[in-house]
Image: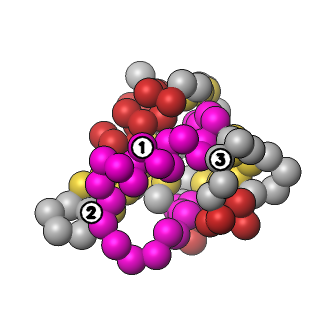
């Protein structure tokens, strides 16, 4: 899940790796990517999510999904961050999954995210 907690609109773009088969990502993508436009003042459009079914995130799941994504671009009115390497993508995802039994993955993007 990607959540916009900032004061400006946020665009999240996942470029999908065509060499790795992932049914959930493949059915969501348009062309080679999945794009979320997260509007800061509209509560219904502040969240973009990809649902992989019920279950638990763990390090192996994170590694597998990281292989399916070639890059992640996160952009607001002032900044753009691009995660290009597998280790950077894996680190971003791993740092943002939390929970005790049922772990969830939520990347919260606020104005400090870009600093």
Reply yes or no: does residue 56 show up in magenta. yes
Q: On residue 103, which mark appears?
A: 2
The residue depicted at 62 percent of the width and 66 percent of the height is: 24
Please say if 96 is above or below 80: below
Q: Residue 63 carries which label?
A: 1
**Residue located at (62% from left, 58% from top):** 22
Examine the rendering and report whether any part of residue 108 can be seen: no
- Most foreground residue, 40 or 27: 27
> Which residue, as the protein is rendered here, is positioned at the far bottom?
54
The secondary element bearing badge 3 is classed as: loop
- What is the spatial separation of the Cα atoms under label 2 and label 3, in whole angstroms? 24 Å
Q: Is mark 1 on a helix, strand or loop?
A: helix
Label 3: few (<14), some or many (≥20) within 10 Å? some
Q: Give me the residue at 60% from left, 42% from top.
A: 69
- Residue highlighted by disc 3: 20
Residue 82: percent from left, percent from top = 59, 27
- The quarter in which the C terminus is drawn is top left
Q: What stretch is highlighted in magenta?
A: 47-76
Q: Is residue 51 visible?
A: yes
Whether residue 84 appears in magenta in the rendering, the answer is: no
- For the residues labelled 2 and 3, say whether their Cβ atoms are less than 8 Å apart: no
- Residue 91 x/y as whole percent: 37, 33
């Amino acid at each position: 899940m990607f959540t916009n907690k900032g004061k400006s609109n946020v665009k999240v773009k996942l470029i999908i790796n065509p060499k790795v088969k992932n049914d959930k990502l493949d059915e969501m993508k348009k062309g080679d990517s999945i794009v979320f436009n997260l509007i800061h003042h509209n509560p219904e459009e502040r969240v973009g999510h990809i649902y992989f079914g019920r279950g638990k995130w763990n390090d192996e799941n994170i590694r597998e999904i990281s292989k399916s994504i070639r890059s992640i671009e996160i952009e607001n009115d002032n900044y753009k961050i691009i995660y290009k390497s597998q280790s950077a993508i894996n680190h971003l995802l791993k740092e943002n999954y939390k929970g005790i039994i049922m772990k969830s993955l939520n990347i919260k993007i606020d104005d400090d995210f870009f600093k």
